[in-house]
Structures are given as structure tokens and as C-alpha cells.
Image: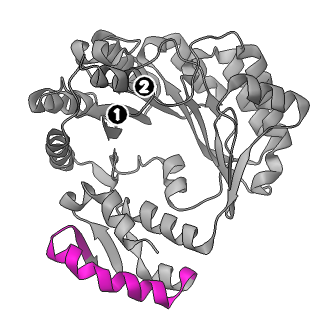
Amino acid sequence: MHIPFCKQACTYCNFHFSTSLHFKDALIKALAKESETEKGFIQGEPVKTIYFGGGTPSILNTTELDFLLSNLHLNYIVTPDAEITLEANPDDITLEKLKSWKEIGITRLSIGIQSFFEEELRWMNRAHNAKQAIESLLLARKEFDNITIDLIYGSPLLTNEMWRQNIEKATELNIPHLSCYALTVEEKTPLYKLIKTRKTPDVENEKQATQFLLLMQWLKERGYEHYEVSNFAKPGFRSRHNSSYWTGEKYLGLGPSAHSYNGSERRWNPANNNLYIKGIEEGNVQREKETLTPTQKLNEYIMISLRTAEGIDLRKLDREFGAEDRIRIEQQLPKFVANRLITFNDSIVQLTNEGMLKADGIASELFA
């Protein structure tokens, strides 16, 4: 469920959001209505995870979140042990809010830390400061065991020593799940314009690669499982929601710009709050959609599976897509093995640490 509101725009962000809350009430009503009208998309299957993403869902008050969550329980078969995640910014977190989130059924928090350094947070134009980053996690640990944080590496300001301190701080606070992303420069973002006008340095690929390799080493030493290229978890704390995407399960996305997949068709809502609200109110949402071909499904399986710790299972690929593609892929593997980018054992293809740096490129070479 996409909550497309933020207090301010981060320099690097290219997600759909608005810094105006003018249409908040109308959008909440539209979300509730869409959840009612689109429940047939996943064909009555039980809902095992719910994810309030953004934007900044913690910008909503507890009554609004409770309304949306209650509406989902009313319209869907939500399993008793469902993982229900709320994305939250540190500056929104208070002990009172944490208690109320827990009371309405939130079971997991995703907190957008990004960095524990004041200068980096200012450079990113984050709404919180370094003190709030730490205080929010200390508070969150009092009410929630299941917490993930986002961290960004490879920014022009981030030295290897600062990166080490970021990881040490997260692990000292006993955060059980980390999502760590290389800073990417997307067009139409403030960061892109700052780099183009030479007001800030560009990112350095070599530095990003070094910091990613250090990240994998440090978190392995601290007992974290590297279960997807960007995701690390203590035992028992993998993200069930994200893992369902990577295993090809059906999902329903609600809200502006939200994507859905029912096993054969992918569709997405307009990335415009006004158009989305109007479409829901009039019963005529202008969604774009595509029906996946067998080749697209195969390529997605290759791309997504290769990014996970489990890797590509060529036996599954043979069963679902045919022996021809399995043989074609097997014939390409020796060069990657020789370059120590993948391992290939008992029909399982997995990336090495060095291979993780080139995951997308390797996948594209294996595509049909």
C-alpha cells in the first residue's frame, strides 16, 4: 500500500511522492475503495504480508493507519501470523506512536536511517538528523523486535571509515535486518542536476564496489546472512514480504504508482495522485498493464533468483521452462566460474561476492 507523501524531497529519490498533504484525506478514501474493488486480482488467496511503503507512511496518524489496516482485514483473508511492515522516518518516531502502531497490528518496522553522519544526512536533504537516527532506533527496540533499516553507501561524502562506523552503529544497536543500497543517480532528481551542474561530485563506481565488498565482509563477521544482493538478516529475520517478490508470488499493489502481479499479468497505477484519486472515485483507473510472455517469465526468474542466496535452480528451470534453456545456460557457466563470479554445484547457480558486484550484467548474459 503506497502512501505517497513526504515532508521534503531527498536529493537522490526518484519514487513518486508529494510534499503537499492537500489530498491526503481523499487519497486515504481512495486506497480503501481500491482495496475493496480489486480484491479479486489475487483470486481470494490468503494475504501473508502487508507492507505500508512510501513516500513516508509514518506521516499518517495512527487512526488513519488503523482505518486502512482494518479495511484490509475486512476485505482479505489475512493470516494470523501475517508480517505487517510500516516504513517510518526517524523524525516521526516517538514511544507513544510505537506503542500505538503495535496496538493496531504492525509487526515490523522499516526505518529510513540512510546514514548516522550529520553531514551526509544534510547532503541527502533528509528530514531527520544524526541524533534522531540513533534515538529512533533506541526507542523502536523497546517495542519491536523485528526492525530493518536502510543504509546508503557510495556517496561522495562517505569514506570507508565512515561506512565502517555506520555498520558498527547498526550492529551495536542490535538491528536484525539491514537493507544497504549503492547510491544511484537517477534522472529528474535534484542529485542528478547537482552533478550535472558540478555543484557536487559524481559517484565513483570503484569506491562503491569497495564499500560493497567491505559491507559483505563486516556483516558476515557479525552473523548476518546475505540472503539477497542488498539485504542482510540475522537468523529468522529475513523480510517475508520482499522474499515473496523474489520467489514469484502474486501481489496486489494499492495506491498511485503501485504495481501488481497475478502470476501472468503485471499492471501499475498512474504515478499521479490526482489522476489516481479521480480514477478510483469514477471507477475508471487508467492502469497500464502487460501480459508476460514465457521468455519474459524466464528472464525474470533468472534475474531475481540470481540475486538471492538460493540462486538459480536449473532443475526448476528445466521443469518450468524446458531443457533447451537449461542446456543453453549450462553452456555459458564455465566462463563465469573461471572468473570466480559464480559457483555451480548440484544444479544450483550462485553468485560469489565478486559476482554480486556484477549481478545485473551476469543475469543479462544468461537471458533468453
Left or right of 263: which side holds 299? left
Is 52 colored magenta in this rendering? no
Residue tagged 2: 189
Left or right of 43: which side holds 250? left
- State which region is magenta: 320-343
Is 331 colored magenta in this rendering? yes
Magenta span: predominant SS is: helix
Residue in front for this viewpoint, 167 or 53: 53
Q: Are marks 2 and 1 in contact (CB under 8 Å)?
A: yes
Residue tagged 1: 185
As drawn, 216 above or below 85: below
As drawn, 120 above or below 48: above
Residue 330 x, y percent position in the rendering: 34, 84
- What secondary structure is marked by label 2? loop
| Mark 1 closeness class: few <14, some 14–19, many ≥20 residues within 10 Å | some
Left or right of 97: which side holds 136? left
Amino acid type of disc 2?
A: Thr
On residue 296, the disc is none
Question: Could you tell me if residue 345 is visible in this image?
Answer: no
Quarter of the image with the N terminus is: top right
Question: Could you tell me if residue 123 is visible in this image?
Answer: yes
- What secondary structure is marked by label 1? loop
As drawn, 139 above or below 80: above
Q: Residue furthest right?
A: 282
